[in-house]
Image (cartoon, rainbow, N blue to C red):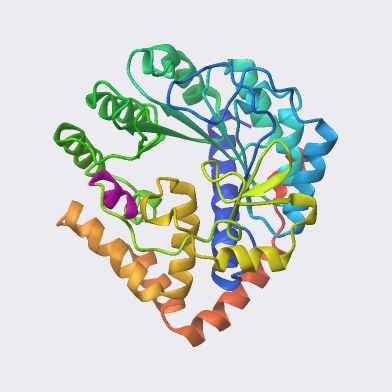
Amino acid sequence: MTKKFRRVLKRAVRKFRETRMFVRAMQSAFHPILAQIVPTRRCNLDCAYCNEYDKVSQPVPFDVMLRRIDRLAALGTTIITLSGGEPMLHPDLDAMIQRIRKRGAIATLITNGYLLTRDRIQRLNRAGLDYMQISIDNVRPDETSKKSLKVLDRKLEALAEHAEFDVTINSVLGAAILDPEDAFRVGERARQLGFTSTVGILHDHTGQLKPLAAEQQSVYERFRALKTPLFSFAHFDSFQENISRGVPNDWHCRAGGRFLYVCEDGLVHYCSQQRGRPGIPLDDYTIEDLKREAARPKGCAPFCTISCVHQTAMLDSFREKPRETLAGILDRRRRLDPGFRPPVIVGVLSWLFLDQRRRDVFGEVIVNALRLMPDNSRRKTTN
């Protein structure tokens, strides 16, 4: 089997599994869509703005990590992300990815990319990794961040050549970044290599969010104008448009229910920036906890910058208000591209999901069909 054919096949299987995740999210309101889990708090870098690492922590024992992955799967979690610290410092990372896949979840990895080599990429391929995200903060390293394009470009080239998983490069804007143009340059390079490219907004050095300055806002608008698939989260996480201007968002955060952050101590938190709430051990977390915390209002929500929490909330928005959510996606796309015409699939989705009765009937049919279809790639990668 050629490398190109393997990539095409694995991508097709991923799209099938994503579809299964989406349809299940449309049918069920009480399972976690996404969980981030920390296998080690230690990191090989020390970026000035980061509060999610230390230099001394030992890796979480392998058997403990497997138990936590199994517990997340038992709660119905559909996407499990290994985060940190730097998760690639954990000696059993590949086996954890295999366990995530074996339990039927989508396996993703957030890494600084420093430890990537051709051999390491091949091992991640064999483990069955679905997605990798790397944040690149600048073009050249400085005292704020060593996560620079200059340092990582060879790593990115190796990923473009060998990775059979999808790669997202997140470039950043904010007070801590000296040259706002760096975000656009990073995004352009990511797209040249065939990766998905997104842009995020950092806190300043005091940990507070500030509106983007005029030059930063200009770069942000240019980035948004780049061509992106219609159903990319970049088109309907409109919360970021408000954040870039320092304007609060009016939304309901479902962290603790639809999104879970599990720290190295095995406690469930709302997110990486709200550790201690609710602070319940994952082993003791129940469906009642999921329902209660998803419903609980969060005072931090209006100025939240945690995009993955917003993204899970947007899926619930599509389930609860499909017509308004779809209209918002299309309107924002037309503002970016006045000549845009919706693809045929939009009409199909509109017919299936915008009518409550059809959505209930066809959603159940689709869910049952997807459950019956085997995931051959998962079986092969976990043997």
Looking at the picture, how far across and down is residue 30, in whole percent? 63, 68
Looking at the picture, how far across and down is residue 276, in whole percent? 62, 46
Quadrant in which the N terminus is drawn: top right
- Identify whether 275 is placed above or below 319: above
Q: Nearer the viewer, residue 326 or 309?
A: 309
Q: How many marks?
A: 0
- Identify whether 288 is placed above or below 180: below
Looking at the picture, how far across and down is residue 45, in whole percent? 53, 17
Residue 314: name its quadrant.
bottom left
Can residue 383 be seen by looking at this rendering?
Answer: no
Q: Which residues are magenta?
A: 239-245
Q: Nearer the viewer, residue 113 or 104?
A: 113
Q: In the image, what residue occupies the spot 74% across and 50% down?
A: 282
Horizontal relation, residue 76 to residue 10: left or right: right
Quadrant in which the C terminus is drawn: top right
Q: In the image, what residue occupies the spot 57% across and 18% down?
A: 116
- Identify whether 163 is placed above or below 198: above
Residue 147: name its quadrant.
top left
Q: In the image, what residue occupies the spot 64% across and 20% down?
A: 120
The residue lying furthest to the right in this view is 63
Q: Is residue 114 magenta?
A: no
Looking at the picture, how far across and down is residue 80, in whole percent? 64, 46
Q: Is residue 243 magenta?
A: yes
Horizontal relation, residue 17 to residue 67: left or right: left
The residue lying furthest to the bottom in this view is 357
Q: Main secondary structure of the magenta part?
A: helix
Can residue 168 be seen by looking at this rendering?
Answer: yes
Q: In the image, what residue occupies the spot 77% across and 57% down?
A: 74
